[in-house]
Amino acid sequence: MSRALSLAGFQVTLIGRIWVTPEDRISVDLDNCYGIKKLSQTFDFTQETVYAIYAPNGVMKSSLAQIFQDIANGVPSTDRIFPARVSVRKITDEHGAALAKESIFVVCPYDSGFGHTEKTSALLVDAKLKKEYDQLLVGIEKSKEFLLKALKEQSQSKKDIEKEVSSAFTPLPNEFYTALYRIKKELTDQKETPFAEVQYDKIFDDRVLGFLQTRDAKTAIEGYVQRYNELLAASIFFKKGTFDYYNAEQIAKSLTDNGFFAAKHTVTLNSNGKSLQISNQKELEGVIAKEKEAIIKDKVLRKQFDELALLLQKNATLRDFQDYMLENEAYLSQLANIVKFKQDILKSYLRVHFESYLDLMGKLESAEARKKQIEEEAAKQRTQWEEVIEIFNERFVVPFTLDVKNRTAVMLGHAPMIELGFTYHDGADNAVIEETALLKALSMGERKALYVLHIIFEVQVRHRSKQETVMVIDDIADSFDYQNKYAIIQYLRDIGQDRLFKQIIMTHNFDFFRTINSRGCVRYDNCLMASKNDGGIVLAKAKGIKNAFLNDLKKGFFADPKKKIASIPFLRNLVELREGEDDPTYARLTSLLHCKADSAAVTETQLDEIYNQVFGKVEGPPNGARSMVEIIHEEAVRCMAADVAVNFENKIVLAIAIRIGAEQFMVKKIDDDAFVNAIKHNQTQNLVAQFKTLFAGDTEAIKILDRVVLMTPENIHLNSFMYEPIVDMSDDHLRKLYAAVLELK
């Protein structure tokens, strides 16, 4: 017998009352992985598909998510703080087989792994394809960094070479790739690198560029260049723009480096009907040197150079440039067109590192080609996208709705990818808005709701492909308002109806932890709490999720002295609500939370009577006339020796004992009954303030007392609606503080 159940896009098959799935258990065994010293846990999904883990900040939540993400990424897990420790990661199914990486889907907080999902393409493209494309971009970035580093070293420049290249070949400083594409043919055709050794900052210094734009500098340079060109025109062998002396030197070196003369080849120079045959590098360099000397020593050219040098000497800040030009006079002829000179220099640098340039260009072109393929494959999932958008629009409360702008075009194959449209709503007014502008107008919670769209899409993809998946969900509801928080809880509940998905929901938000249980997302028995001790991480069944007092402490009031002590603040809350703070019973209970004049006189019998008074019936026999303060300290000592675990009563007992012990110490030291008895509110803080005034030199005691003020209030004054602080507080912190308070005595 079978039937189908449809929930929010899922269709789940039931056979009788038995769920059918190939994976029912996941075992986790970890040593030294991202701060998790040790963790051994089996998640049994035989009956239910969801576990929830409450983990205080710093215990294990993000580390466990990272470990699963490592499996999905196919990389090992390590201990970042102690890398020498041997890390062991064994996460297996019920057959002992390691989980396949494609079977894991880690849902990280908004500012983690899914940070780029704000973009429409990232929201719609298949996650696997997107990951592949992102990896292409990573490869591009590495090649880019390698090329820029090489250009930086070649130019000896302190400037931003990426911006220099971009602004040299495009109108903008942030179009690096466009610039590289633009000069690709020029670099391919270019064989020589005449300006590869130019020290970039010597010429393209802001002060130098400013000087070159002055009228006197332009006149002097124009005169020099004019005479230089005249000499080139009169040269026997040199020719402007094709074979001047710095080009000739490059050619001579290149011929030698490539074994031209060693292979017994010759070069023939022709001029004015005459020819000169060159058979080795020395002869060619001799001809070049002779022609060069004839130009350099020209009297008119020298005069023009001296005029420019004189201008440079008048400016002390340009002396480096002057010295550089004296050593590299050949570059002066290029200064008349500084824009072209800059381009030629950069092209020389790039030509020297042409292989790195081609590597980057190849990766850019491959990424572009693969991007088109990704878009084509994503377009085939058009129906799926529409279902996801429908779920999103129906469930999440945001000031906008989504639609598909080019649905028909995609269905007909005229467009490679669906485009999302956004309509912003403000009362009766609606406005179509671009995503960039929309994101600026949204709160973080609303942005995160949009981010959930990608999660829904990923789940739908896995559901359609029948991909059995372990979903590790790390505080997905942070920053949500309550309405959207309930929407994501409902969606997680729907996912839980599909046996393809096993969920491990982790949170440090106790209210969210309680809500996913109360709303049927996860059974009570599958709610775990994480605690940390010297041996590692312990996951224990949760206690007190709904109401710690009614469901646990109240039931054990007469049987367990620790639970009796832990009930004191709850009882005081009830008395306060019913009778007010002026009631004698309220005052008596306060004497068990602070060191009052009558604290030592309050007996266990009196506390039992208060319990019976509040609840109107006897739950158990009175236990005796012993002082409750003595019992509090006795039980606190027992808590010091107890196993570290997730429980309320040990922590509350320790917190109460810490406060009373600290106040007993201060009251005795201050020795002023009138002052102490006059305190009506905030007794611990007032005592500490007076202690600091009277005993300012007792710095060690003050440090301990400051910790008492910091750690105990929220761990004592708690009620059925707010006791997250006591859950988050480590047993170890409270034990160490109580030991320190005992030392004060």
Image: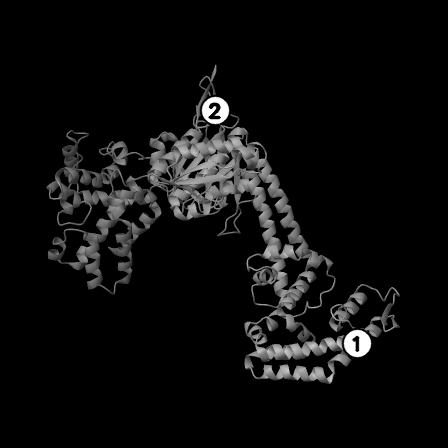
Q: Quadrant of residue 535?
A: top left
N-term-proximal mark, 2 vs 1: 2
Name the kind of residue labelled 2 in the image: Gln
Name the kind of residue labelled 1 in the image: Ser
Q: Secondary structure at mark 1?
A: loop
Expressed as whole percent of the image width and height from the top left, the position of residue 568 reads 21, 40
Expressed as whole percent of the image width and height from the top left, the position of residue 51 reads 42, 33
**Discs 2/1, front:** 1
Expressed as whole percent of the image width and height from the top left, the position of residue 414 reads 59, 36
Residue drawn 17% across the image and 59% down it: 670
Residue drawn 11% across the image and 44% down it: 582
In the rendered image, which residue does mark 1 sit on? 235
Side (left or right) of 101 relative to 198: left
Residue 546 vs 738, above or below: the answer is: above
Nearest to the observer: residue 392 or residue 156:
392
Expressed as whole percent of the image width and height from the top left, the position of residue 269 reads 85, 70
Q: Measure the C-alpha gap from mark 2 to mark 1.
A: 87 Å
Q: Quadrant of the C terminus?
A: bottom left
Q: Which mark is residue 602?
A: none
Residue 376 vs 685, above or below: the answer is: above
* Residue furthest out toward the top: 1
Q: Secondary structure at mark 2?
A: strand
Q: Quadrant of residue 325?
A: bottom right
Q: Which mark is residue 11?
A: 2
Check if mark 2's residue and mark 1's residue have beta carbons within 8 Å: no
Side (left or right) of 224 relative to 740: right
User: Does the rendering let one see residue 381?
Assistant: no
